[in-house]
Amino acid sequence: MAMRSTTSTVTFQHPFVLSGYTDELPAGDYDVTVHEELLEGLSFAAYRRTATFLTVRGRGRRAGRVELRSTSERDLETLLGLDRGTATQNSETALSPSEDFE
C-alpha cells in the first residue's frame, strides 16, 4: 500500500498540554507530521490519515533530543482553537478540565 507523509508547522501563542501527556509544552512553533495511506480501488487518488505526530524538541538538559508525540487531528485542532480563543470550554471538542490552560 502506498504511503505519504506531509509536514507542516503550527504556532502556539500560549503554553499547552497535549492530550495523553502530563507535561506542559511552551508556546512556540511545532512541526506536525501526518502519515496517510492511499485508498486502493478508486477511480481517483484518495488518502486516509493513519497517524498524526507533534514534534517536541528537548530543552535544557534534553536539548538536542527530538520526540514525536502521537495525537489526533481533532485534539490538535481543539488545542489550536483554545490557543486562538476561538473554541469554548463548553464546546463538544473542548478538553477536559485537567487539560485546560489559561
Image (cartoon, grey):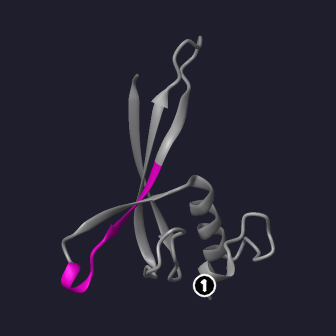
Q: Secondary structure at mark 1?
A: loop
Q: Quadrant of the C terminus?
A: bottom right
Residue indicated by mark 1: 101
Q: Is residue 36 above or below residue 18?
A: above
Query: In x, y percent, where is residue 53?
Result: 43, 55
Q: Is residue 75 above or below residue 57?
A: above
Query: In x, y percent, where is residue 79?
Result: 60, 69
Judged from this view, the residue extending furthest toward the bottom is 102
Left or right: residue 74 versus residue 49 is: right
Query: In x, y percent, where is residue 50?
Result: 49, 40
Left or right: residue 38 versus residue 61 is: right
Q: Is residue 14 above or below residue 74?
A: below
Query: In x, y percent, where is residue 6?
Result: 41, 43
All told, the count of numbered labels is 1
Is residue 84 in the magenta section?
no
Magenta span of residues? 52-62
Quadrant of the image occupied by residue 31: bottom left
Q: Quadrant of the N terminus?
A: top left
Q: Amino acid at mark 1?
A: Phe
* Point 62% across, 82% down: residue: 98
Is residue 58 in the magenta section?
yes
* Point 60% across, 78% down: residue: 99
Quadrant of the image occupied by residue 92: bottom right
Q: Nearer the viewer, residue 46 or 97?
A: 97
Quadrant of the image occupied by residue 4: top left
Using a 10 Å C-alpha cutoff, classify the residue at mark 1 as few (fewer than 14 neighbours), some (14 to 19) or many (20 or more): some
